[in-house]
Amino acid sequence: MHINTVRSRKPPGRNVANEPLWFRVLLIAITWCIALVLIIIPLVYVFVQAFANGISGWWKQLFDDPETRHSVFLTLMVAPAAVLINTVCGLAAAWTITKFRFPGRILLLTALDLPFAISPVVAGLMLVLLYNVRTGYFGSFLNAADLRIIFAWPGLVLATVFVTIPFVARELIPLMQALGDDEELAAVSLGASPWQIFLRVTLPNIRWGLLFGIIQCNARAIGEFGAVFVVSGRIERETYTMALRVEKLFQDYNNTGSFAVASVLTLMALSTLLLKTLLERMISRSAGEGHGDGH
Amino acid sequence: MSFWKLLYSKKSRSPLPGFATGLSVTVVWLTIMLFIPMLALVAKSWALTPEEFLKAAWSERARAAYTLTFGAAAIAAIVDVALGMLFAWVLVRYEFPGRGILDAIIDLPFALPTAVAGLVYSSLYVKNGWFGRYLVPLGIEGAYSRFAIILVLVFLGLPFVVRTVQPLLASLEGDIEEAAASLGATRWQTFLRIILPSIMPALFTGFALAFARGLGEYGSIIFVSTNIPFKSEIAPMLIYSRLEDYKYEEATAIAVVLLAGSISTLMLINWLEGRNRRYAH
């Protein structure tokens, strides 16, 4: 299920048994046309719509509307919280799974993939079944403790964590498997403490891969819709994330407002892509210098 | 793969520290965030009698929703296989202006929030949208139709196929193709008999990933679909509407069917990948 996100940098265009020039040009042209229609024009369209009333209009839509302002705030709280949880625990999972052999190891490995196969709406439903105050399995307990999870921010965090569980761990596991544990074993034999091993040996080796996983996890956390939609209950100025706000403004026929919020989300997505591309360069460069035989 | 084999993979001792801490953190994390929620779904569906379950999960409205969900996801994934193959081929084999940009922009559907994708696609294809003003007069409704659902799923699934095919295509050795050419094979024959069979597993994996993604998709589809029961209502949407009516049992039953579809797709992918790895070494 893991996608090899690190692309090959091998220069293409070897002239081994190549196709005729007209054919190559034709294929490239078709590819560009499809990319234009499916990806590039929609991307441009977001900004054309968002800036339809100029930059001041865009700014007004974003920051003069207290509900929109709150949704930006909420997304900036919920997404990092979910990313933090999944990064710390994902690191622990990757360490445990790659450095040790133990009963249930493959079961854990499989479980890490499960959120990819579960529809976000179903994930949200699971949380509602557990935590809703009327009939949920933990409902009476939550009532007694006067805690609210569904229709409140903790539910948003739980839903976001659920759908982004795989990202950091799945990025790290193949990487740490490939690196092996020779360096860590050497550090142990030299008497290094567990923290020293992690901070001075493992972390420098996996830093770019870790960052890669965090960036992807963050992009998904910010954009998550289905699971959050189900548990949010959509209470104004309480449980609207930016993605939900886009939908709300769209339903209210506030097109420029909707596109203004969407343009911020799109800018975040574009910076994600930029960072990923830069990181891929870093990864392939550091692979080229150091471990020449990185099999 | 038997359950016992899953549970008792070979045990070995390592002198490295952190096993107890790492394992506890991992197990607590997955239990709270993943296993208990999944258990809630199982418990809820077991509370139903088989008749109740069937009545909820197999109603006429639910069947229409499954047909649309599975059908749209399958068609979109097939289109993605064709387009993804083309993209991967062009990106790996040819050098042309803007190749780097194209290579980076392919990942946009991974990074872009699905609500944004839905918003843009619905506005582009309506009657006075940039594409709609040319397409709607021709009778092509790219928004608020079943076609719209497929269209946005094609967008979301494309990078799955490109990114699974690309590394495999790049790793193919040129000498086999040269040998085929020297034996008088045409380019087309070489493609069909040599290149296509070797990237077939990647195409299958890409298809399954795009299909699984399409089955669960919700965020973009509520923008581009009219969401009318029996006509344009997908299964996740039906689950949500049952939930809004506090019919948790019905929602659960439908969710179990949807989950069965996507988890068996995941298992198929793992099986395919395991098989490929065995052949590769």
Image (cartoon, grey):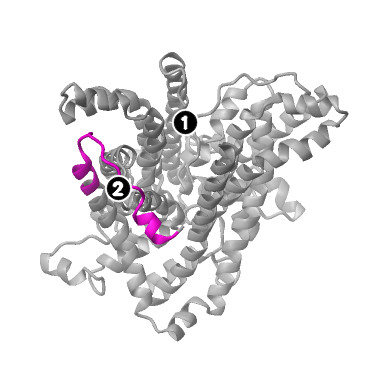
Q: Residue at x 78, y 39 (%)?
A: B193
User: x, y (%) of residue A80?
Assistant: 28, 40
Lateral position of residue B80 relative to residue A277, left or right: right
User: Which amino acid does the dot numbered 1 rest on?
Assistant: Leu
Lateral position of residue B123 relative to residue B240, left or right: right
Is residue B6 a member of the stretch shown in magenta? yes
Q: Nearer the viewer, residue A43 or B49?
A: B49
Residue at the far top: name it. Answer: A289
User: x, y (%) of residue A222?
Assistant: 37, 43
User: Which amino acid does the dot numbered 2 rest on?
Assistant: Phe
Q: Residue at x 42, y 76 (%)?
A: B250
Residue ID for mark 2: A102
The circle drawn on residue A273 is: 1
Q: Is residue A233 above or below residue B162?
A: below
**Which residues fall within the magenta stretch?**
B2-24
How much space separates mark 1 and mark 2, taking CA atoms?
37 Å
Lateral position of residue A73 relative to residue B247, left or right: left
Res A277 seen here: yes
Q: Crowding near pointer 2: few (<14 within 10 Å), some, many (20+)?
A: some
Q: Residue at x 56, y 35 (%)?
A: B106
Mark 1, secondary structure of its residue: helix
The circle drawn on residue B231 is: none
